[in-house]
Image: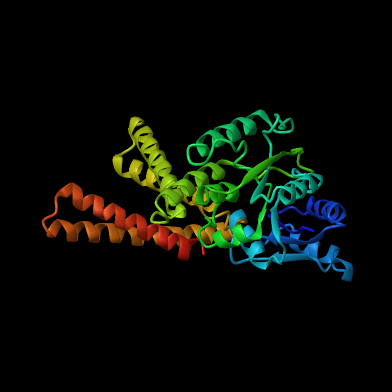
Amino acid sequence: MASVSVIIPTLNERANIVAVVTELRSILAEIDHEIIVVDDDSIDGTGDLVRSTFSNESDKHILCIKRSWDRGLSSAVVVGASLSTKQYICVMDGDGQHSPADLGEMIKLISAKDLDLVIGSRFLEHSVESMSWVRRAVSKLGTKIAHCFIPKTVTDPLSGFFLAKSSIVLDLKKRLYKGGFKILFDILMLKKDLNVSEVKIDFNRRLKGDSKINIATFYHVVGQIIENITRGFLPSGFIVFMMVGLLGLVVHLFVLNSLISFDVSFYWSNASALLLGLVNNYLLNNSITFGSRYVTFWPKLIGFLKYILANSLSVIANIGVAGYLYMGEFGVAASAIGGIVSGAFLNYFMSKEFAFR
């Protein structure tokens, strides 16, 4: 008889999580199972609600981990997998869009065919009626990009609903991109010889609340691909950080040229562009690169001041390294590039370990 650990990462799912766990408990009543909710310190009290609702002796197989030290769907799955004790690990969302009823079919299939992985596919037999056309288009585009790096036989490599042998997830946990959202894609990239099948799922509308799929998903998928291709030499977080930085450069140049066209002096135009570029980068890094580390106004303001300090140190590093290289008879271009690269790495390190800590 199969045994299953169901891992549910949550962030502000108070309105949905009890219904999801209750249905799961019913569906898995005849199967050896445990349900592990990994909550990213939700401000709506999701973790506290799970603990208080399922606190009876009969619910001892329902565990809730409320973590304040980290954020991110993939890292939540890794934490849950480390605590799991069953033969298989299932990953699913806590918003009600993944139907627990589909898990029963996935368990039957993985057991009967001794598969490594079963994916709950949104696109098998066009099972995406509840998705908006925008999200469907983005998912299709993401799938086409993903197919450049994994077998094309998988119709939904970006699915958030899958069932895998525990040994596979645990073997890969040190290599999985912890800051990402698409852990299934990571697994498929890192281990291409898996025996995989898919099950058509009923992709439901969210029970309540808003979807958390946004532009951050695209940024992290790109970073995830580059990290895996370079075997970790270029960390995905750094790639995402640099992508945000490039967007900030566009904002800076746009504001600078716009103000100059209105006869504002270069000094004030450049100062304004620099400030707006910093604000843009800070807000995007907070929401995209570092998973909404700051949510309310005052923490955001304090974080912004720390971010300015981090940037000022990177500027000093840029100037120092560039000057040192130039004094060492490197060319102007090579010296400037060396300064930019050193400043970028220090900026990322300071942002990660200080501004967004």
Toward the bottom, the furthest residue is: 57
Residue 167 percent across, percent down from the top left: 62, 61
Residue 45 visible in the picture: no
Quadrant into which the N terminus falls: bottom right
Image: 300 above or below 151: below
Residue at point 38%, 42% (across, down): 249
Q: How many marks?
A: 0
Tell me: 323 left or right of 198.
left
Side of 277 relative to 86 (left or right): left
Residue at image position (21%, 56%) is: 322
- By what rule are the colours in the image chosen? rainbow
Residue 153 in the image: above or below residue 338: above
What residue is at 52 percent from the left and 37 percent from the top? 147
Q: Tell me the residue at 39%/51% (across/down).
A: 230
Q: Nearer the viewer, residue 342 or 88?
A: 88
Foreground of the two, 283 or 104? 104
Farthest residue in the left direction? 329
Residue 96, percent across and down?
A: 77, 46
Furthest residue to the front? 113
Residue 332 x/y as whole percent: 16, 49
- Taking the image as drawn, is residue 256 in sight? yes
Is residue 113 left or right of 355 when viewed as pictured? right
Q: Nearer the viewer, residue 233 or 46?
A: 233
Along the viewing direction, whichever of 218 and 296 lies nearer the viewer: 218
Q: Quadrant of residue 43?
A: bottom right
Q: Position of residue 268 (x, y in %)?
A: 34, 43
